[in-house]
Amino acid sequence: MTTPYVSWPREVGDLRLRVPTSHDVDRVLAWRNEPEVTRWLLRTTLDADELRAAWRSSLDDPYDQRILADLDGAVVASASLGVDDGMGQPGSDAWRRAEGSLGYLVDPAYAGRGIATAVAGALLDVAFTDLGLHRVTAGCFAANEASWRVMEKLGMRREQHGVRDSWHDELGWVDGYTYAILAEEWAGPPPVGAAD
């Protein structure tokens, strides 16, 4: 199996998608650690050193894609695509590095502009076109309607509704959703500009 190569930056509408640099840490954390954002995250706080280390470790690993979205000079979103083995029997390696896990965050000042859909759609395209993955999943708290609406716009199907399966510090035990899409179901990124 040859190691794939993913090329950045990429343009998606008015967004420029690129790999992060250490200079971006403070710009991202300025909005990433706001209560409006962390309300829907499992990892509610992240410090600069942790973020910098995660970005640095992903630079040479095509199976750990971490990107930022720039709009008019502002970093407005971050997203990630991690690749893992699927489930499979040992008679074949088809399941190795076959499944991706998608995540995305948008600066609240830019919410509702279609940025999450554009960024997540670009990473799904990378997953299926550049990396040749079989399947990609994403999850969220069920109450995070903005997030699951993005997944549905991208053609992902709700595969799991976990009843009170997720702990939320403010709300207690809450429901969670898991979405997925297969390579053969991927129709490509939606048109840019559809509101999230």
Image (cartoon, helix red, strand yellow):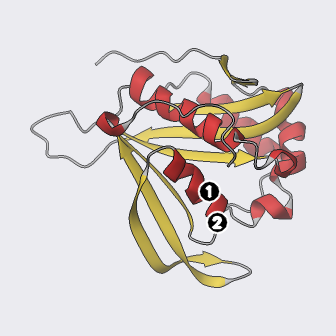
Up-down: is 16 above or below 195? above
Q: Is residue 84 above or below residue 143?
A: above
Residue 58 occupies which quadrant of the picture?
A: top right
Is residue 46 or residue 67 the one in the foreground?
67
**Mark 2 Cα shell of 10 Å, populated few (<14), some (14-19), many (≥20):** some
- The answer to which of 68 and 89 lies nearer the viewer is 68
Q: CA distance from mark 1 to mark 2?
A: 6 Å
Splitting the image into 4 quarters, where does residue 193 fall?
top right
Kindly give the residue lying farthest to the left in the view shown: 91
Q: Are marks 1 and 2 in contact (CB under 8 Å)?
A: yes
Looking at the picture, which amino acid does disc 2 mark?
Asn
The kind of residue tagged 1 is: Ser
Q: Residue at x 74, y 31 (%)?
A: 69
Q: Residue at x 76, y 36 (%)?
A: 52
Viewed as shown, does residue 92 lie left or right of 103? left
Tell whether 11 sits left or right of 84: right
Mark 2 residue element? loop
Look at 38% across and 45% down and name the residue there: 181
Where residue 153 sits in the image (x, y, percent)?
A: 53, 47
Residue hosting label 2? 144
- Residue 47 in view (yes/no): yes
Q: Which mark is residue 20?
A: none
Does dot 1 land on a helix, a strand or a loop?
A: helix
Which image quadrant: the N terminus?
Answer: top left
| Residue 147, numbered label | 1
Which residue sits furthest bottom?
172
* Residue 101 on image: x %, y %: 48, 46
In this rendering, position of residue 31 left or right of residue 140: right
Q: Residues within 10 Å of mark 1 (few under 14, many from 20)?
A: many
Confirm whether residue 63 shows in the render: no
Q: Residue at x 40, y 32 (%)?
A: 187
Quarter holding residue 71: top right
